[in-house]
Image: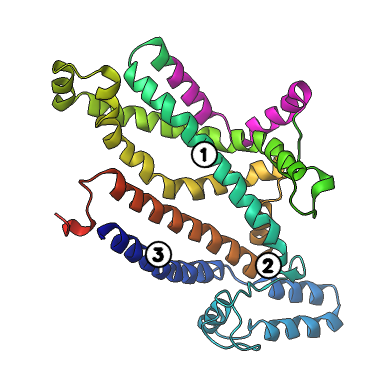
C-alpha cells in the first residue's frame, strides 16, 4: 500500500536525520571552550587542591574525553568502542552527569515520561481549544463571536507563560484548591501506579496543561481561522451553497479538510516549541520535567546530560513530523509521495 511504503520510508529517513542531528548537537555543544571537567580542573588548581586533579583526569579517560572530538562522538553514540567497549546511546548507556554525579539515565528516567505526559496533555488541550474556536470564528466572521475569539487569542499570545503560571499558581490554589508544585502528591512519589496516584497526576496536570498550551492554542486558532476563511471564499463553496447544501455540511465537507492541512502539519513544530516554552514554567511550578535539568546542564557544560536531552527533544520533533506527514497523506487525497501514485 502507498501509505505503508510512505510510512516506512519516512521512518527510515527519520533515523538518518536523527543521526545527523546527534552529530550537530554534539559538535555544537563542544564549540564553547572547555567542558565541565576542564572547568573543574581549573577550579581545583586555583584553590590549590592538586590532589583532586588526578581523580578528574581519571574521569576524562574513563569517559573518553581525552580522545579527539570525532571519536568522542562515535563513542557517545555507541558506534565505536570506548574504554568499556561498545557502550553508548544506541546500547542504552546515556552517559554520566558530572554535575549531579550520577548516570544520566537515573536523572532523566522519571523526568522523561513526565515531560511526555505534560506535553501530550498540552497538545490535546491545544487541539481541543483551537479546532472548535477557529472553525467558529471563521464561520461567524466579522461578528461578536469572531471578535471575542480574536481578543482571547491575542491575549493568549501576549501573556508570558511564566506570568500566567504565577497567576494561576496563586489564584488556582486560593479559589479552586488546585494543588501546586510537582505532578503528583508527595505521598505517591516512588509508589506503584494506582487510582489514587492517577487522580493526583490528573489534578496536578490542570494548571501546567493550561499554562503551556494557551499560547499554542491561540496561535493555532488564528491560523485555522485564516485558512478556513480563505477556503470559504472560493467558488466551489459558493456553488455548494447555491445547490442547497446545508451550511454546516458546506463547511465540514471540503473547506475544513483543506484548511486542516497546516493544522496537522504543525504537529512536528508544536512538540519542541511546547518543551522549550515549558522550561520556565517547569521551574516556576516545580515540575519534575527535563526542562530544569536541561537548563542546569547547559549552564554547567554537563555535555552528556545536555546532549541526551537535546537529542530526545530532536527525536520527539522528528516523530511528530513523521506522524503529521502520514496524517496529511490520509487526510488529503491530493497529497502523494513524490507524485508517484497519480
**SS assignment for the magenta stretch, majority:** helix
* Marker disc for residue 14: 3
Mark 3, other Cα within 10 Å: few <14 / some 14–19 / many ≥20: some
Mark 2, other Cα within 10 Å: few <14 / some 14–19 / many ≥20: some
Q: Earlier in the sequence, mark 1 or mark 2?
A: 2
Q: Is residue 121 left or right of residue 228?
A: right
Image quarter hosting the N terminus: bottom left
Image quarter hosting the C terminus: bottom left
Q: Earlier in the sequence, mark 3 or mark 2?
A: 3
Foreground residue among 306 and 13: 13
The image shows residue 201 at horizontal and vertical percentages of 71, 42
Q: Is residue 256 left or right of residue 167?
A: left
Q: CA distance from mark 1 to mark 2?
A: 28 Å
Q: Earlier in the sequence, mark 3 or mark 1?
A: 3
Q: Is residue 174 left or right of residue 95?
A: right
Foreground residue among 166 and 51: 166
The image shows residue 100 at horizontal and vertical percentages of 76, 65
Residue picked out by circle 2? 105
> Is disc 3 placed on a helix, strand or loop?
helix
Q: Which residues are magenta?
A: 148-177
The image shows residue 129 at horizontal and vertical percentages of 49, 29
Residue picked out by circle 1? 124
Between disc 3 and disc 1, the foreground one is 1
Compared to 60, does 121 lie above or below? above
Q: Is residue 335 magenta?
A: no
> Is disc 1 placed on a helix, strand or loop?
helix
Residue for point 62% across, 51% down: 115
Amino acid at each position: 500500500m502507498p501509505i505503508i511504503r510512505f510510512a516506512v520510508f519516512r521512518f527510515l529517513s527519520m533515523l538518518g536525520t536523527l543521526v545527523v542531528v546527534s552529530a550537530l548537537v554534539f559538535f555544537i555543544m563542544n564549540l564553547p571552550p572547555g567542558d565541565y571537567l576542564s572547568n573543574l580542573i581549573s577550579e581545583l588548581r586555583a584553590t590549590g587542591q592538586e590532589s583532586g586533579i588526578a581523580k578528574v583526569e581519571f574521569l576524562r579517560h574513563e569517559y573518553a574525553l581525552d580522545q579527539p572530538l570525532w571519536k568522542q562522538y562515535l563513542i557517545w553514540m555507541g558506534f565505536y568502542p570506548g574504554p568499556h567497549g561498545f557502550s553508548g546511546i544506541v546500547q542504552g548507556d546515556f552517559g554520566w552527569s558530572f554535575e549531579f554525579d550520577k548516570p544520566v539515565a537515573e536523572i532523566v528516567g522519571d523526568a522523561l515520561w513526565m515531560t511526555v505526559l505534560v506535553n501530550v496533555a498540552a497538545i490535546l488541550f491545544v487541539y481541543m481549544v483551537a479546532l472548535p474556536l477557529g472553525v467558529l470564528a471563521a464561520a461567524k466572521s466579522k461578528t461578536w463571536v469572531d471578535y471575542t475569539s480574536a481578543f482571547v487569542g491575542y491575549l493568549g499570545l501576549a501573556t508570558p507563560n511564566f506570568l500566567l503560571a504565577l497567576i494561576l499558581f496563586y489564584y488556582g490554589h486560593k479559589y479552586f484548591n488546585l494543588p501546586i508544585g510537582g505532578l503528583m502528591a508527595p505521598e505517591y512519589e516512588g509508589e506503584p501506579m494506582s487510582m489514587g496516584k492517577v487522580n493526583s497526576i490528573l489534578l496536578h496536570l490542570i494548571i501546567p496543561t493550561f499554562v503551556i498550551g494557551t499560547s499554542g492554542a491561540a496561535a493555532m486558532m488564528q491560523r485555522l481561522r485564516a485558512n478556513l476563511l480563505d477556503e470559504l471564499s472560493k467558488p466551489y463553496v459558493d456553488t455548494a451553497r447555491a445547490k442547497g447544501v446545508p451550511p454546516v455540511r458546506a463547511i465540514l465537507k471540503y473547506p475544513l479538510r483543506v484548511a486542516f492541512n497546516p493544522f496537522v502539519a504543525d504537529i512536528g513544530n508544536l512538540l519542541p516549541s511546547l518543551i522549550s516554552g515549558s522550561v520556565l514554567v517547569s521551574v516556576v511550578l516545580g515540575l519534575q520535567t527535563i526542562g530544569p535539568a536541561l537548563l542546569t546542564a547547559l549552564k554547567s557544560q554537563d555535555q552528556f546530560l545536555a546532549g541526551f536531552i537535546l537529542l530526545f527533544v530532536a527525536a520527539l520533533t522528528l516523530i511528530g513530523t513523521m506522524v503529521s506527514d502520514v496524517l496529511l497523506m490520509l487526510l488529503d487525497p491530493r497529497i502523494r509521495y513524490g507524485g508517484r501514485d497519480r
